[in-house]
Image (spheres, rainbow, N blue to C red):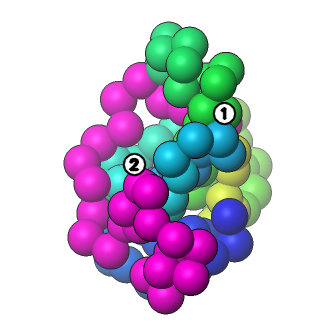
Amino acid sequence: VDACKQACDNNPSCNSFAICQSGPSGCWMKDRVITASDAASTNGHALNTRLCRTWYKGPSSSPVSPAPSPEPNQAGTWFERLLVAVEGGDVAGSASPLMSVDACKQTC
């Protein structure tokens, strides 16, 4: 996860990413700005079998409620949530599924 956070931070087109803990995995970087209020995926296989989660960036602190939506690639804190229904487009540099761990480390 830390390698994906760093890879996304270093890619100006990346605003969020998804990781699956089971089955084909990788660091799928996305261009979409995700918020806590985005609808979650209803794909049972992705959620329950593959254990996919979305990571998105939000403000480090939010003195006002509700918190403002983050700007693309804004500095802040990474948050984990259920896989979102609409992930956005793939970003160049994402790790491909079914690649070796060594290849993934080189990509990330």
Horizontal side of residue 88 vs 60, given as left or right = left
Q: Give, as a single range, the part of the protein colored magenta.
A: 81-108
Q: Main secondary structure of the magenta part?
A: loop
> Going 53% across and 26% down the picture, which residue do you hit?
46
Earlier residue among tags 1 and 2: 2
Q: Position of residue 54 (x, y in %)?
A: 56, 42
Q: Is residue 90 above or below residue 68?
A: below
Q: Which residue is mark 1?
A: 51
Q: Residues within 10 Å of mark 2 (few under 14, many from 20)?
A: many
Q: Position of residue 98 (x, y in %)?
A: 44, 57
Q: Position of residue 52 (x, y in %)?
A: 59, 37
**Quarter of the figure with the N terminus:** bottom right
Q: Secondary structure at mark 1?
A: loop
Question: Is residue 43 shown to the viewer in this render?
Answer: yes
Q: Is residue 28 above or below residue 2?
A: above
* Amino acid identity at mark 1: Leu
For the residue marked with disc 2, what is the amino acid?
A: Val
Disc 1 to disc 2, C-alpha distance: 21 Å
Instruction: Give the x, y percent position of residue 24.
Output: 51, 47
Residue ID at (39%, 48%)? 33
Residue 46 in the image: above or below residue 29: above
Residues 74 and 8: in front is: 8
Residue bearing the label numbered 2 = 33
Name the residue located 48 percent from the left edge and 80 percent from the top edge: 103
Element assignment for label 2: loop
